[in-house]
Every structure is written in structure tokens, then in C-alpha cells.
Amino acid sequence: MLDVQTGGTQSRKRPRADSDTHANSRQDNATDSGDLLPVKCEDLKHHEELWFEDGSVILVAGNVGFRVYAGILSRDSVVFRNLLNAPGAKSEVMENCPVLRVQDTSADLEVFLSFVYSGSKFVSNAKRLPFSTISSLVRLGHKYEVYRLRDDGLARLKTCYPSEYTDENWNDFAKLNSSVMVMENTRSAISVVNLARLTQMDILLPMALYACTYLHLSTLLHGFHCADGVLETLSPEDLFRCLQGMKNLLKAKRKASVWILKLRHCSTDCQTPKKCCAAISSLLRRAHDAGSLASFQALNPLLQPDDEYFCKWCEDMIISQDDVAIRRIFAKLPSYMGVTVEDWATASGKPNFSLLYLVNFLNFL
């Protein structure tokens, strides 16, 4: 029996917040529950779709068997090629077919094999994939060095965790979807951080760590169980980055708020200066009442002006001022979250603001 644990690749490890069991939340390259003892061949569950009667190798993950074609695996993955040719690779046989036990979840392996046997064209043509599918592709694509799968998944992740400023409103990370990926819940931000660490894709870290600051404190500290039963948590170091990041973001948000709320004038195009000046004077009170001054969600707009308080020109002026502050915070996000990222884009685009708040903006810097 050949039990695959290393294969020369970086193992999958999801750390736990509980320090007493930190190293054993699951074995590296986690398997399904109940696999501490090898599943006997007669107890093996055949995968409904990935069990080909003429397949030449049986991969076992937990209690699920996948009978597939060794030639295609060897073609796409040098890691599998080496494993299948390793001494002892045919020491366990089932139905005249060598058995290779891998330390992955059956859910991860199902996704990985489905895309391997469908070809890379299927991956690139898939319009939108759920995050759970993408995480499996990234994790096993990295482990088994099928880089076309890993890189496609990472490219999709970048569309929801960008390194360039966009005009999105970050109020709800559960809705942080794109044309190629669907985030299934806010807790997945923890998984994105771990995938970024696994693949050394540091460009994902600032936004992924920032997204973690939105989580309930219990989830942030203790993690959550994925659908496959794996406990997904942040490392102690990344947990500290999130907690320190909250403090940094709160300071940045307050500094930006003070700068924005220094407004004491209407737009030069304002047609109702008395009404708008009174509304502008009440900005600080309204922001305080809304809790905006105590928020570390620093990429959210501070103000939500509307026609009830402002004319169109004054509303545009305030939104532009707010946008300038958010862009500046975004440009410094890696520093706030305690990571170093090369080529982190500074605020892209040119906000529409007047000479007066250009002077204020320089003071804000």
C-alpha cells in the first residue's frame, strides 16, 4: 500500500486557534473523518461519476474510491507520475488495479479530478465557479503541480480580492462576487488568507485580511468548519495581523473622517446654499449618530448624503471628498494589515475634487 503524504510538494495544513491542538486540527493534506485506519477495499465507496471500469489506478480519499486513468494523471502531474512509478506503488491491488491512497478530502479530490479529466478548456470556459470549487482547484493544483488549475483559481480569486481600487461598496463581503467567482459566505475570507499563504500569492492578503475584520469575533478567533468537515482557522500570526489591523483601520477611518467633516462650504454650483450649509454643519453629528466614527470598516463610505439634505452638486462634492479618503486608505492597506506586497496598486483613477479639498487632502496625507 502506498500512502501519499508528501510527494515532494507543500502539504495542506489548516491551523487551529486552539494552541493545545494547533498541529493536529487535521493531518497535513487533510482526509475525511474516520480515516485514521485505512479503509478496507471491500468497504470502499465507488464514486458515482469518477469510477471508470477500464481505469488503470484507484485513488482513495477517506472512504471514497476514484478509478481513473493513470496515463492522464501522469501527463498532467509530475507529482502523480512519480508516485505511480514509485517502489511499492502496486503493493495494494483492488480489482486488478493498483490502489493509491492520498491524504486529501474526497470533496477536494472530486473537484480536482473532474477538472483534470474535463481538460483545461472546460476550466477557462466556466463562467462562474463557487469559492468552494476554486479553493479545491487551488489547493490540489498546487499540491500536485497542475499549475493550470491552480493559476486559473488564483486569477478568479483576484477578481474578488483586488489589488487595485474599484468603486465597489465593501459593506457585505458575502456579496463580493465577480463575473467568474461566487463567494458563498463571509467566513471564506479565512480560507482565502490560507490559500494565499499556501501559494505565496501575497497580493491577495491585504483584502483577504481586511475581509476577516468583518467576521464575528468568535469566528475570527476559533475559525469555522467547512462543508467537508475541515476546521479552517487563521494562523496565530495572521490572527494578530487582523486584530492589529482593526486598530490601524480605526485610526485611519477617524483621521479620514475628521478631514472630510472639516467641510464648511457648499459647492460653487449650489443653488440652495442656506439649506446645504446647514446640512453640512450637521455632518459630524450625523456621522457620530450612525456609528461611522467608531468603525474600522475603513473602505466603506463615511457619508451617505441624499437629496433630503443636499442638492445634487453638494452631494457630488461630499461623495468626491469621501472617495479621496477611501482611495488613500486603500493605497496603505498592506501596511495597515501588517503585510508587505510588491506592486500593490495605489489609488487608480482620478477622483473629481476641487482645488480647495486638494489642499485639505495634502494635509490629510
Image (cartoon, rainbow, N blue to C red):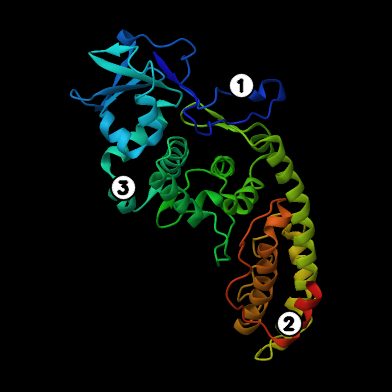
Q: Mark 2: few, some, or many residues within 10 Å (few <14, many ≥20)?
A: few
Query: Is label 1 in contact with label 3 (beta carbons under 8 Å)?
Result: no
In which image quadrant can residue 93 be found? top left
Label 3's element? helix
Residue at mark 1: 24
Query: Is label 3 in contact with label 2 (beta carbons under 8 Å)?
Result: no
Of the image marks 1 and 3, the number of the one nearer the N terminus: 1
In the rendered image, the vertical position of residue 237 relative to residue 69, given as above or below: below
Query: Is label 1 in contact with label 2 (beta carbons under 8 Å)?
Result: no
Of the image marks 3 and 2, the number of the one nearer the N terminus: 3
Q: Nearer the viewer, residue 259 or 203?
A: 203
Residue drawn at point x = 67 percent, y = 65 percent: 331
Spatial separation of the CA atoms under disc 3 and disc 2: 49 Å
In the picture, the disc for residue 358 is: 2
Please state which amino acid type lies under the numbered disc 1: Asn
Expressed as whole percent of the image width and height from the top left, the position of residue 297 reads: 68, 55
